Image: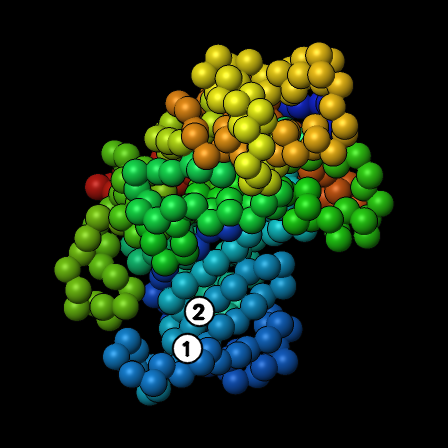
Amino acid sequence: MNTPTYHSNAEENFNPLDEPELMPLDRVGFDTNLLVDPTVITEANSEHIKNVRLPKDDPTGKYRTERTLLVELHGGVRLRISDCGVKGYWLRRVELNVGKLTNHHNGGLPSTPQVVTAFAVVCQKIEPLLADPGDAVLLIPGGHKGSPSYWSSVEIDMHLHDPDETLLSSLRNVRHPGVRKKATVYDGESITLGNRRGGLMISFYRKDLEMASDLEEFGVKDAAQILRVEVTLRKDALLRYLGLPGNTAMVSSVYSRGTGVPQARLVRFEAADIMAAHKKITGELKGISKVVAKGDLPTNERPGRMLGLVARHTGTPVEELLELYRIRFVPASCTMTRMRAAALDEISLNPGPAAELFTEDRYNNQPVISIPQLEQSGYPDDYPSKYRPLIEAAYGTRPAFTHESEAA
């Protein structure tokens, strides 16, 4: 299996320039409109389907008249299928997690070949469910000129090494011009700007803590302490950040049943587009503390707050100022604890200009979490599939067709 040699050791980073080009996607989803074989739906115990369930009914009835089935395939692929009565069952949306589909966990950062593999696997998995298996060539957005598919959500990840949570603390007052509400903060765990209903959501969270149960189960003890910076794009934000020339096509909404006016939709992207979008969004962040801080427990200790102000205005590390105070005045340890909390809280409440957390060097050297036992049973980067040439053409590993010409 030709996977990049990423390291889980916190002291070791990788340079993506030495490896296959990164396309650091996590969960992605696309809308489509393909007829499904009704026998597959009626046979709940089909080998292709893990389970079928109905969502809660909409009491207003103002959104959809047809029944919606949520189908989970093996490997973390989720389908939304509409029951249109005599018109049959139609596949409307596909959601997948690239890392879980290829490596059975998402602690890494996928490369372009791994993303292509994930999309090819999705085609192979869904093909038996379609009324016309040949429609599988139309499944992945951008893979064929006649495809009704377009991207509805894209998650882009970045990893920062944060062993003492100083980076997470420095982000507690972060804001973005594209998100109106202030950040939701769970101390020591996560910070979130926006929500999944909006076009843009930015999440900062400890990936190693999220994966703690899996790491324990597989005996991984040297996992990097990672702060994941996850950007989720939906709706207009997809075109705003990824809608470059060649990435869009005029497509009708899959929910318009062919009666809607075609609109510009995102139908493809390349690794460089994904990285550029993430860098642009992090470059727009405001309110990051200039002096990074660990923890924030409010207190009224004036000496501690004064040290926080000095640290913020001079750029002197707050720990250095606290150590000087300790040497000079020899206070009790509990006093130092209160002072430290006050200093860090003062920094957090008064953020300076954006810290250089998102430098080119940090993008080029990112830690990842590896679980070798799971990765060894994953799909190879050169996974053989009859759909792979179409996907490679659309996603950057082969010359792409234009939407004015016929697809291969």
Q: Nearer the viewer, residue 51 or 365?
A: 365
- Which residue is outermost to the bottom? 86
Mark 2 or 1, nearer chain start: 1
Q: Is residue 323 left or right of residue 386?
A: right
Tell me the residue at 40%/69% (across/down): 91
Residue 302, horizontal then vertical, whole percent: 55, 29
Q: Quadrant of residue 368?
A: top right
- Which residue is outermost to the left? 261
Residue 271, label in figure: none
Residue at mark 1: 68
Mark 1 is surrounded, within 10 Å at the Cα level, by few (under 14), some (14 to 19) or many (20 or more) other residues, namely many
Tell me the residue at 35%/49% (across/down): 181
* Mark pair 2, 1: CA separation: 7 Å
Tell me the residue at 56%/49% (across/down): 186
154 versus 149 height, above or below: above
Residue at mark 2: 80
Residue 300, horizontal then vertical, whole percent: 55, 36
Q: Is residue 169 left or right of residue 391?
A: right
Q: Nearer the viewer, residue 144 or 41?
A: 41
What residue type is disc 1 on? Thr
226 versus 101 height, above or below: above
